[in-house]
Each structure stands twice: as C-alpha cells, then as structure tokens.
Amino acid sequence: MSEANLASLAFIPEVTLGTTPATPELTAIRFTGEDLGTNKDTVQSEEIRSDRQVPFVSKVGLNPGGSFDFELTYSAQEAFIASALGNTVLALSLVDEICSFDDTADTITADAGAGTFDDVRVGMLIKVANAATAGNDGLHRVIGKNATGDVLTLVAGSLAATDAADTVTITGRNITNGVLKPSFTLEKGIVNLSGADFFQTFLGMVVDSFSLDVTSKQIVTGSFEMLGTTAPAGSATTIDNDATYTAAPTDGVINGTNNVGTINLDGVAATEKFKSLSLEIGANLRGKDAMGTEGFFDIGTGTIEITGSLNVYFLDNDFLDKIRNHTSISLEFQLTDDAGNSLWIYLPEVKLNQGDPKIEAINTDVMIETEFQAILDPVTGITCSFDFVPA
C-alpha cells in the first residue's frame, strides 16, 4: 500500500533528447498532482476465424506522457516554462559597462561598440543600475537592437535624461519564445509502506502545453502537459547518483490578489478591473515513430499558439471597443511574491476575440469575458516574454 503524501517527482535537463546525463543529480519538483505515465499503443489482429474470436493483440508502441499540476512560485517552474516556449533561460549580467543614454530616441548606446549587447534579447526586461541620472535606472523593456549589437531601443518614455559615458550595470533574466526543444528526464517516486519503493523514469520529456490561471482570492495555479520519447521499466531504486534529490526552490506561492502588481494594456496601467486571467501556451508537438523503435526516436515541433481569457468588470465602452474593432493591444502583467521577487509576462501583440457585457442574474456584477490570442509582434519579433526580476 502506498500514499500520495509520500510520493515525489524530480527532473534533470537533458543535453541530448532522450538521454539521461551521466551520474545524474535530480532536482525535486514542487507539484500538486500528476498523471504521468506510459501510453501503450496496441493493434488487434484482423484474422478471420470461424469461431469469431480475436486471436492476438499486438503491442506496437510505448512512450511516456502526461502532466503535472503546480502552484506558481517565482523560480520553481522556470525550466519548464522555457521548454514550453522552446528556448533557454537567458541570465544577463553586464557589469561596469560604459553607456550613453538618449531620452529623446529612448536608446542606450554602448561605448565599447559592436557586440556589447549581443546577448540582450529584443522583448526582454533589463534592469539598469548606477546611472548618473537616477531616473534612467530601473526596469526597461527592450523593443529593438541595431545590427551591430551596440544600441538598444527601449519603450518610448523609458528614460529621464540624456547622459554620456555612464558606468552602469545591466542585468536581466528572460525567456522569449524560440525554436529550441529543451527536454528532461523525469522520475516519479512512490513509497510503499511495505518498504518496496517504486521509481518510474520518463526520458525525452518536452513540454507540449503550459497553462496558468490567475484568479482573485485564489492561489495562482497551472499545469505542464508533456510528451516524451521512451519509458524504461520501473525500478526499486532511484536513478539519482547519490539517491538524494536536490531540494526545489523554496519561494512562496503566488496568489491572485496580494501578489498581482501592474497590469498594463498598451504600455500603460489598465483602468479596467480584472476578475481573472488565464494563459495557455501550446507547442503542437508530435512524436516521431519508426520501425524498430518502441517509443519515439524524436519529437517534432509545431506552431506555438498562445491563447487565454480575460474576465473584466464592465466599466465603459473602451475595452468593448477594442474587442469589436479587432484592435491589436499589448498585454503585460506582473506577479510578485511576498519576498518581492517578480515574474513579468509580456504579450506585445494581442487580438481580443468576441465578448459582450453579460447580465447573468440579480445581485451580480456585469462582466465581459473575452478570449485572446497572442501573435507575432512586428516590432520586437516575438510573441511572448517571461522575465524574472529578483527582489
């Protein structure tokens, strides 16, 4: 007999899809539930028999898949968000860089010249510190970069003054959508009270979809749906090199009331009041099968689709007109935990689908619930950006 309270999930990033790194040191996953398992494909014999019976059912495939649910924290889900977006986590740190600021053009120019900002991603948030003018410090959204990588263009109005030859520090931690395929080896552990522990390993696991639900007076929750290549038979021992998982980050969970900060529409703080917001990122993955391979020999990627919904209190026609006119808007919202660590989600080009004020019953509020889709932004060249800003 086994109990869920004694179960565990852990992971390690793979360098090669479907191959667990040598001497693996797994990290524990914070989760609230899971349905990870093996998907077995079978084919029934079509043989015609005079006694009307089925003579054989053949196993023709076995590959891992499923999902796990979580309560959102600042950093515990970072690696899986990167997999969902098809990119790596960029940790930017430019220390004692000499730069010039132009508040008219909203640009930062590196005095060192070409290549200084090669690692900066267009669409990401950067944090500037130690500028001569204090108003040039702080968080700035990068919306452009020149071909030689020494001039950054920021959102209009970002800078307070024009200064030359400032020695500054520029940092950031970002994931934007990309074309990579970050994968993991996952291990599920089940402790049996009889002492016969069980560990199940899933290889080549890539996030196929990522959902997030932000609702007032609720903990922010989500789910990662995954697709993998192979699943070895279960074992009584863990694959972890020292049989002890690295502890998961201990950041506090984020809720949809106290931990929701700025919500920006078109770059300015929204006047609307939001009851809830949901986000769904789909990668449209597909497993590739071949003769002689029981699982998948590779996982194909498809179009990234980023959709969601907004539930808004009806105040006036402004938001309704955006829906009816099919106006493109940008959507940005900030989630900050109790320690001051912030997660920023930025969708620079969003189309709102249909939605009208609904009068559902007496003693209720009039709401607009609309679905949206994020698409390629012609300015930044991205669809989505996640930025992690420590306290």
Image: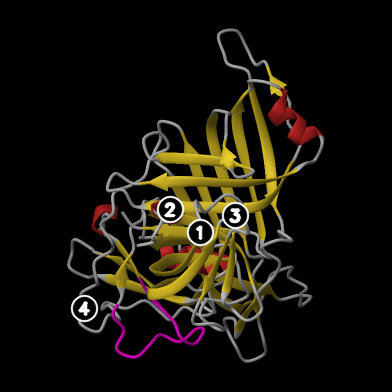
**Is 19 drawn above or below residue 246 in the view shown?**
below
Residue holding disc 4: 243
Q: Earlier in the sequence, mark 1 or mark 2?
A: 2
Q: Earlier in the sequence, mark 2 or mark 3?
A: 3
| Residue 187 locus on image (x, y percent) | 36, 72
Element assignment for label 1: strand
Q: Is 202 inside the magenta-drawn segment?
A: no
Element assignment for label 2: strand
From the image, give the main secondary structure of the stretch colored magenta: loop
Residue holding disc 3: 155
CB of mark 1 within 8 Å of CB of mark 2?
Answer: yes
User: Most extreme residue toward the right, as rendered?
Assistant: 325
Q: As shown in the figure, which amino acid type bears the numbered disc 2?
A: Leu
* Mark 2 neighbour density, 10 Å: few (under 14) some (14–19) many (20 or more): many
Rounded to the nearest angstrom, the CA distance separating label 3 from label 4 is 49 Å
Residue holding disc 2: 343
Q: Earlier in the sequence, mark 2 or mark 4?
A: 4
Magenta residues, as a range? 11-25
